[in-house]
Image (cartoon, grey):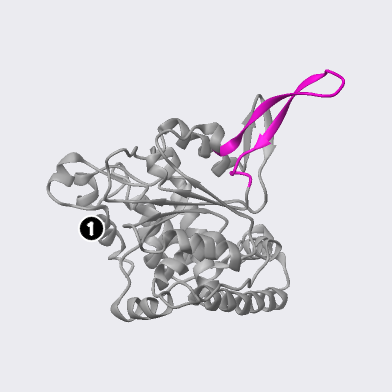
Amino acid sequence: MNAPVAPPALSDDPDKLLAELETLGTSLAKVRESIGRVIFGQKDVIDQTLVTLLAGGHVLLIGVPGLAKTKLVDTLGTVLGLDTKRVQCTPDLMPADIIGSEVLEESDSGKREFRFLKGPVFAQLLMADEINRASPRTQSALLQSMQEHRVSVGGVYHQLPDPFHVLATQNPLEQEGTYPLPEAQLDRFLLQVDVDYPDLDAERRMLIATTGVENEKPRQALTAAELKAAQTLIRRVPVGESVVEAILKLVRSGRPAETNVDEVMKHVIWGPGPRASQALMLAARARAVLDGRLSPSIDDVVALAGPVLRHRMALSFAARAEGITIDNIIERLVAPLA
């Protein structure tokens, strides 16, 4: 049995930690059940999104229109008891439309002063719909908020709510009028979740359930305070030494300058940084707890390698011309771990 790597918070009583994890597991089962009332199929998408929120991160959802990406975000806001706001990204969207702006007001006495009007970023769950349709200037307005959980307007910092999560959607097909997200902002997303079509059975159930007179409504299963406590608890989950080594080996093997994997040296122009290792560690803990386990395994690392790494690596032009994809490279990297 592997000895656990104990972060400072693991001075807790093990029995108490076990009881808290079991209680959280019961709550997460209710969360899954409530989401399943309105989102049909898409189990991996739902689980990966929940993993992101439990780990305290942001998620990028990529898929064609009509796959319930927006509905998933709305449902999560209800089920987790979060204050939710939505921004529809367009080329003419300005930074002030997201973070807010100062207005000049005059009091009855004639005194003039600026007052800050908060934008939609001041929410616990912010949905940025079609984020790649916003201009780079507007995209950058989200960068500080995603990393620091605060915004700066007129030289004054304004703290965002806690917890704070950005769930962004992106359409991979309609490329006209879109602006690729910069690498620095992509790296702020804990996971990139690819949303595919539902299977036949799920689509049949969805067809019947959503075309009647009344549609099923999601029910709240957690509060914002309980989600915040769960995020703290996730960071106390012990991780075995073999899992730590697997994470380090996987991430470092994706860097052209440090790897001995031929496909990476030949086709990858830049690889994942340390933030990828941090994301894998947190996400593996969250996935284990979501599945009712008390510590993560190497299987969690393998399962999360794609969502964690695919937006943190870039292929050369020659590789893309040959039809090679990032997922092909990631499959090669995780093969020794599987």
Foreground of the two, 99 or 105: 105
Q: Is residue 105 magenta?
A: yes
Q: Is residue 245 left or right of residue 313?
A: right
> Residue shown at 65%/24% (left/top)?
154
Identify the image quadrant of residue 242: bottom left
Quadrant into which the C terminus falls: bottom left
Does the image show residue 97? yes
Position in image of residue 4 (x %, y %): 56, 68
Q: Is residue 12 above or below residue 91?
A: below
- Region in magenta: 98-122
Q: Is residue 276 left or right of residue 4?
A: left
> Residue shown at 62%/49% (left/top)?
123
Foreground of the two, 168 or 303: 168
| Dot 1: element | helix
Foreground of the two, 118 or 332: 118
Q: Is residue 333 magenta?
A: no
Position in image of residue 170 (x %, y %): 37, 50
Foreground of the two, 234 or 250: 234
Does the image show residue 244? no
Q: Is residue 225 left or right of residue 241?
A: right
Residue at which label 1 appears:
328
- Density class for disc 1 (Cα within 10 Å; few <14, some 14-19, many ≥20) is few
> Residue shown at 53%/61% (left/top)?
74
Amino acid found under the numbered disc labelled 1: Asn
> Residue shown at 46%/69% (left/top)?
47
Position in image of residue 101 (x %, y %): 62, 30
Position in image of residue 317 (x %, y %): 18, 40
Count of residue discs: 1
Given the current orientation, which residue lies at the most extreme right position? 109
Given the current orientation, which residue lies at the most extreme front position? 213
Identify the image quadrant of residue 199: bottom left
Q: Is residue 117 left or right of residue 245?
A: right
